[in-house]
Image: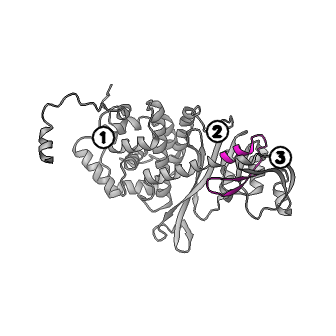
Amino acid sequence: MNSGKTVFAQIMQLIPRREFNEIVTRYKGDYRVRNLSCHDQFLVICMAQYAGKNSLRDIEASLNALAMVKKLYHCGISYAVPRNTLAKANENRDWHIYAELGEVLIKKVRPLYAKDKFRLDIDNMVYAFDSTTISLCLKLCPWAKFRKNKGGIKIHTQIDLRGNLPVFIHLTQASVHDVNAMDEMYIEMGAIYLMDKGYIDFFRLFNNIHKNGAFFVTRAKDNMQYKVVSSREVDCQTGVVCDQIIRLTEEVSVKKYPDEFRLVVYEDFATGNVYRFITNHTGYEAPTIAELYRERWNVELFFKWIKQHLHIKSFYGTSENAVYTQIWIAVCAFLLLALAKKKMHIEGASLYMISQTIGTMLFEKIPVRELFNKPNLNVSSDDGQLELFRDLKS
């Protein structure tokens, strides 16, 4: 039954207010604040993300229009925030407030997707780890210097492939090498971590993952020096060229990874490409190792979704704090949609479909779940009113 709340307000009521208020208090986010609280700032930026607003001026105009038709209050936003006030909040209010809120939301969302089906029949938790670079104007953001004439930041993300949800996000300048983010990874015993060969650092693979009882699957670099310890029989019809236990031979590499690990060479019959995978997991068959790596592309789909639908290419501020604030609120907005999908029992709709639908119906007073009910397309009778259009066509 419709409670009178707008679609936006129904999504925002999923914010864990007690935990959020504790975070704000810890960082003194509302200290000496007269009007725009951290909660109001979060609501306004979330609304801008869902509605696709590309600038502070667009946000201000939308808030003023909503205030004129008396819809702003029903969205939970206390007043039409001037763009200068919002800009100052983005510049000065600690972005860690929203980063910690994101971590709280991750902990609430993950159990809801724990029983989702995974394409491969394996019991281990499977994570994909990768990064994406977001370009910034170097003149406006000199703190984000990447190359001589370019600026940017990296979003290092660990995705739980059961539900394709972020488990860990780490923001750095684009100049930071990917392997450095491995020191911040969330490592779980018995889990499998899928990474591209940009993350090959044998010291970290051995000490951060292997020694903690976890597994990695990645691609071997062309210059890897090794010797074959033993070989397994393979079925060439599955695309597996060889399945070997190997040991590194280069002196520096041996010190970093002194143990044996596995090399699987696989040919993709569809493209003719040959891939060399390395892993410390010796239990699964070679084709399963190749299929596991294929699942790594889900993290790329997550990056594409975030960039296209949560509008982090058009930033509302140029300082490091403002940029990081917007990215973390965008992540929180994504997690709130994932939470709404399960809490509101939205069946048969992807997060992409939910995002697109929510964006067009933000200020309507209709239960969110009803937005995804299939409409009745049966026309009961023709009472003659369609004759007008038939005449126009003729």
Q: Residue at x 56, y 57 (%)?
A: 132
Question: Would residue 287 be counted in the magenta stretch?
Answer: yes
Tell me which colouring the rendered structure shows: one colour
Q: Which residue is mark 1?
A: 363
Residue 293 position, x and y percent, is 66, 49
Residue type marked 3: Arg
Q: Which residues are magenta?
A: 264-291
Residue 123 found in image quarter:
top right
Query: From the viewer's perspective, is 60 left or right of 18?
Result: left
Residue type marked 1: Phe
N-terminal of the pair, mark 3 or mark 2, is 2
Q: Residue at x 59, y 38 (%)?
A: 162
User: Can you name the residue that lies furthest to the bottom here?
Assistant: 148
- Determine whether the residue tagged by mark 3 lies in a helix, strand or loop: strand
Residue type marked 2: Leu
Q: Which residue is mark 3?
A: 232
Q: CA distance from mark 1 to mark 3?
A: 61 Å
- The mark lying in front, picked from 1 and 3, is 3
- The mark lying in front, picked from 2 and 1, is 2
- Residues under numbered marks 1 and 3 in contact, where contact means CB atoms less than 8 Å apart: no
Q: Which residue is mark 2?
A: 120
